[in-house]
Image (cartoon, helix red, strand yellow):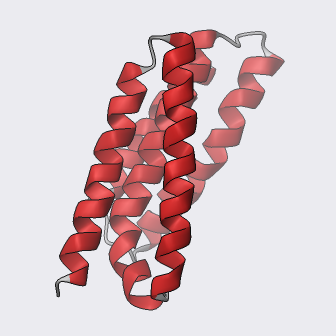
Amino acid sequence: MADTVTAARMAASLFLLFLPMKSIWFLVIYTVSGLTDVLDGWLARKYGNASEFGARLDSIADLLFYSVLLIRLFPILYQTLPGEIWYAVLGIVLVRFAAYATAAVKYQFFWFRILLYIAGQYAFWHLLRHWRSI
């Protein structure tokens, strides 16, 4: 059951790419997706369904959710936040990448997650370069 909730969050995250940002549906799906992040773990523990696969699926769903939000919110954030903030963002990204790299070395089968993360970061920095040139 918990893995189904996680899979639904992944589908909802992808659906956010196609909704207008200022629509009520974007807000509803965004909120429900955020709540299911807590719900899936609770369901897994409550019903004794916690598994390594579920934990990994949850991590991938989180990464997908945050990547979609970054893609959707980046243009707005870039225009409103001061330039100094982006140095802090770079620091956070580097720390997260180091954490993912450490997990990849430790568990040796997180490469799919690493590739997703790198793809998300590539998209982020590509967008950053694009908007700076405007």
Q: Count the numbered circles shown.
A: 0
Q: Position of residue 43 (x, y in %)?
A: 73, 25
Q: Is residue 37 left or right of residue 76?
A: right
- Going 38% across and 21% down the picture, which residue do you hit? 111
- Asked which quadrant contains residue 131, the reply is bottom left
From this view, report whether residue 117 is shown above or below residue 32.
above
| Residue placed most toward the observer, 47 or 111 | 111
- Going 54% across and 12% down the picture, which residue do you hit? 107
- Going 60% across and 51% down the picture, which residue do you hit? 34
From this view, report whether residue 132 is shown above or below residue 15.
below
| Residue placed most toward the observer, 95 or 40 | 95
Q: Is residue 102 left or right of residue 113?
A: right
- Asked which quadrant contains residue 92, the reply is bottom right
Look at the image and tell me in which quarter the N terminus lies.
Answer: top right
- Asked which quadrant contains residue 124, the reply is bottom left
Q: Is residue 29 left or right of residue 16?
A: right
- Going 26% across and 55% down the picture, which residue do you hit? 123
From this view, report whether residue 131 is shown above or below residue 88.
below
| Residue placed most toward the observer, 20 or 86 | 86
Q: Position of residue 21 (x, y in %)?
A: 37, 73
Look at the image and tell me in which quarter the C terminus lies.
Answer: bottom left
From this view, report whether residue 94 is shown above or below residue 2.
below
Q: Position of residue 12 (x, y in %)?
A: 42, 45
Residue 62 seen? no
Residue 105 seen? yes
Q: Is residue 87 left or right of residue 76?
A: right
